[in-house]
Amino acid sequence: MTKTFFTLASSSPRRLALLKDIGIAPDKVVAAGIDETPLPKELPRPYAARLARAKLDSVVAKEPKGFVLAADTVVACGRRILPKAENEAGVHACLKLLSGRRHHVYTAVALRTPQGKILERIADSVVAFRVLSLAEIDAYAKSGEGIDKAGGYAIQGRAAAYIRFISGSYSNIVGLPLFDVAQMLRGCGYEV
């Protein structure tokens, strides 16, 4: 059996590393470069789904062959979409909001098969932070780890010490629900 060409429609090093963890090495990695601004009154789950599909459509236009996998991760506190923290102040604001609370991490996955079929799924994980002191929030923000991360934290790093509870897929919280991705690919005949 010949190997089918596989493109990851993401510039996220975390998604690339997660795929490699389950034995998938994409032939090509292409950043989608789409506008990620939420629509007025858009809720977190549909927002994640819309962005994953937009990323897929953008990359499929450039990479018409093989499998194309796109994803988008959104951290939501209630109906509120938390941004990717752009700087220390952004990390600080996110952690202050998440301190002592539960929140959802949604990752929408969109897959285009070589036959042109589109499959879509959304994984939902719940994360609960313990109550954080202002000193802990300041120290984490200064570490730089939460910059460019949805919700301003990385569960696979120092923030793990603040998380008292998770329900759902751990890899989803990192950035890609590996169980769902593997099931989607297997269902389409891709060897995982």
Image (cartoon, helix red, strand yellow):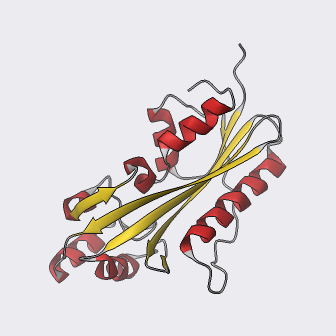
Q: Visible in this render: residue 89?
A: yes
**Relative to 163, 71 lies left or right:** right
Instruction: Tell me: residue 13, above or below residue 35.
Output: above
- Is residue 145 in view? no
Q: Quadrant of residue 65?
A: top right
Count of numbered tags: 0
Please tell me which residue lies in front, 179 or 150. 179
48 left or right, relative to 56: left
Q: Is residue 94 above or below residue 127?
A: below
Task: Name the quadrant containing residue 103.
Answer: bottom left
Q: Position of residue 24 (x, y in %)?
A: 55, 31
The quadrant of the picture occupied by the C terminus is top right
Which residue, as the protein is rendered here, is positioned at the far bottom? Answer: 40
Most extreme residue toward the top is 1
* Coordinates of residue 92 in the picture (x, y in percent): 32, 80
Residue beneath the point at 19% across and 60% down: 161
Q: What residue do we see at 57% from left, 31% from top?
A: 25
Q: Is residue 28 left or right of residue 20?
A: right
Towards the viewer: 143 or 85: 85
The image shows residue 48 at horizontal and vertical percentages of 59, 65
Question: Quadrant of residue 130 in the image?
Answer: bottom left
Quarter of the picture containing the N terminus is top right
Q: Which residue sits at x=65%, y=32%? A: 187
Residues 104 and 90: in front is: 104
Q: Nearer the viewer, residue 190 or 151?
A: 190
Does residue 98 lie above or below 188 as drawn?
below
Residue at image position (65%, 27%) is 190
Query: In the image, is residue 131 above or below residue 185?
Result: below
